[in-house]
Amino acid sequence: MNLIPKNFYLDDIFDDFVPTFNSNKMKCDIYEKGGDYHIEMDIPGFDKDDIKIESKDGYLTITAEKTMEDNDEDKNYIRRERSYGKYSRSFYLGDFDNTDVEAEFKNGILKITVPKKEQANEKNYIEIK
């Protein structure tokens, strides 16, 4: 039995040379409750002004962008792990009224409520020729 992970010895060596896709950005939970869709998304380290929510063609797109600030040139970084850049997620919600969408950002968590649009229960039959 081997308790040491395969990449234990070389774990940090290639981090600075090989860019990796960080899939843990903007993780979210989506659920339906009380006739509404709810999206709760983790966006830690961002301010409310860094986040934009857009609706278009049935899609709700959340974008967060943070730029790197290099104000102090005297710093000699040994390692930089904090994330900067632009992150985006899109969700297809179908036909919804974007004027009733509510969003709140607090403690790094974005909460969005989208009212579901009432679906007509009428059946339409198509004639076969």
Image (cartoon, helix red, strand yellow):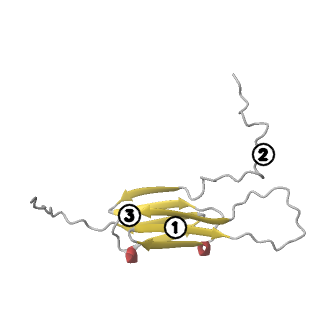
The residue located at (55%, 64%) in the rendering is: 88
Q: Where is 57 relative to 83, above or below?
A: below
Locate the N terminus by quadrant.
Answer: top right
Whether residue 73 sits left or right of residue 90 in the image: it is right
The residue located at (50%, 72%) in the rendering is: 53
Distance (Cα) linking label 2 and label 3: 40 Å
Picture disc at residue 108: none
N-terminal of the pair, mark 1 or mark 2, is 2
* Residue 8 x, y percent position in the rendering: 75, 36
The residue located at (39%, 62%) in the rendering is: 37
Packing grade of label 2 (10 A; few <14, some 14-19, many >=20) is few
Locate the C terminus by quadrant.
Answer: bottom left
* Residue 3 x, y percent position in the rendering: 71, 28
Give the amino acid at mark 2.
Asp
* Residue 81 x, y percent position in the rendering: 74, 56
Q: Which residue is mark 1?
A: 62
CB atoms at circles 1 and 2 under 8 Å apart?
Answer: no
* Residue 73 x, y percent position in the rendering: 87, 71
Residue toward you, 61 or 110: 61
Q: Quadrant of residue 64?
A: bottom right
CB atoms at circles 2 and 3 under 8 Å apart?
Answer: no
User: Circle 2 sits in a helix, a strand or a loop, which is it?
Assistant: loop
User: Circle 3 sits in a helix, a strand or a loop, which is it?
Assistant: loop
Distance (Cα) linking label 1 and label 3: 13 Å
Whether residue 104 sits left or right of residue 98 in the image: it is right
Q: Which residue is mark 2?
A: 12
Q: Where is 108 relative to 16, above or below?
A: below
